[in-house]
Structures are given as structure tokens and as C-alpha cells.
Image (cartoon, rainbow, N blue to C red):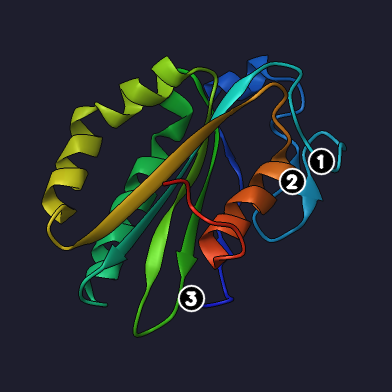
Amino acid sequence: MSATLWFTPWKPGPAADTAPGASGGRDGKGQSGGNGRSGGGTDGAAVVSVTEFTPHRPLTALGVTVEGIALRRIWQDLEGAVGLWLWVDPDPFRPRSGSISVWRTERDLHAFVGRRDHMRIVRSYRNRGSMRATTWQTDGFDMDATQEAARALLSGRSAWPA
């Protein structure tokens, strides 16, 4: 696996307003911003989802990236969405990409996964690569800790759950 991972800036969702501190923290480039709390976080529980798509053919990565950016544009309209990072491994021979999304509840995550636009993308790329995902719950969302845990999974420093 490539050691290089690029992250988009943190994109807060509508639930970020109800999660104190969730709009602060790192912006994807490692820069602190937002509310002044360097770690960012929330006093409430959250659900974190990490996804990874590895296409069979490198050129397929471009289409997946474009679709991910399109979904990111509607992020502020998604019920229960706390925030999102998109990420990409720019390896020209084995590119990978995905998301790290944070949700108020598991129900909110499942509502997004079942959305028509999301399902259309999943179906259109289902046979064009391999996909894996994991989720976990946290009692208090911390942006830095979440991004580091996801980075450990994506870089191979931590094993994906079986």
C-alpha cells in the first residue's frame, strides 16, 4: 500500500451544528481550524464509517472520484451527517479511494447507504473493483483520533476487522 493518502478538507453536515466541536479540528491537510479546539469533537455519541474502493483497472478510479465529489456536494443536506472526509491513494498502478463519514446514529448512516443516488453509484461500480468498509461507535467524536484511526486502517498499520 502506498504511504501517501490525500484527504479533502472536513465537510461538516447538518448534524455538526448539534455536535459541539465537530466542525473544528483538522481540515484534511492537517491544519487546525473551525472552533479553535485542536482536536475537534463532540460530547455526544457518533458513528464512524470508513470505506475503501480499489478498482480492477486504474482508469476506473477517476469515475469513482467524480461520483464521490458529487455526493460530497449534497452533504450539508443529509439528515444526521456530522461530517466527511474523502480520501485517495494516488498510486498510478493501484489507486484506491473512499470516505470517512461521521453520523449522529447508525440509522442515519443506513439511510444514506440506501439513498437512490448512492445505490446507483454502488451498483454501477460493483463489478469494477473491490470494496470494503467498517464502522464503529464512539462516545465522544474526536476529529484527530478518528482521522488517525482511519489512516492506520488505510495505510495497513492497523488490520481491517474480519
Looking at the image, which residue is at 24% across and 27% down? 115
Looking at the image, which residue is at 60% across and 23% down? 46
125 w.r.t. 83: above or below: below
Nearer the N terminus, badge 3 or badge 2? 3
Dot label at residue 144: 2
1 and 2 marks in contact (CB < 8 Å): yes
Q: CA distance from mark 3 to mark 2?
A: 22 Å
**What element does badge 1 sit on?**
loop
3 and 2 marks in contact (CB < 8 Å): no
Q: Position of residue 93 (x, y in %)?
A: 34, 85
Residue nearer the viewer, 130 or 141:
130
Q: Amino acid at mark 2?
A: Asp
Q: Position of residue 122 (x, y in %)?
A: 20, 45
Looking at the image, which residue is at 24% across and 63% down? 63
How many other residues sit within 10 Å of disc 2, few (<14), some (14-19) or many (≥20)?
Answer: some
Q: Amino acid at mark 3?
A: Met
**What element does badge 2 sit on?**
helix
Q: Which residue is mark 1?
A: 39
38 w.r.t. 54: above or below: above
123 w.r.t. 151: above or below: above
Q: Quadrant of residue 7?
A: bottom right
Q: CA distance from mark 1 to mark 3?
A: 27 Å
How many other residues sit within 10 Å of disc 3, few (<14), some (14-19) or many (≥20)?
Answer: few
Q: Which residue is mark 3?
A: 1
Q: Nearer the viewer, mark 1 or mark 3?
A: 3
Q: Position of residue 127 (x, y in %)?
A: 12, 58
Q: Amino acid at mark 1?
A: Gly
Looking at the image, which residue is at 64% across and 55% down? 28
Q: Residue furthest bottom?
A: 93
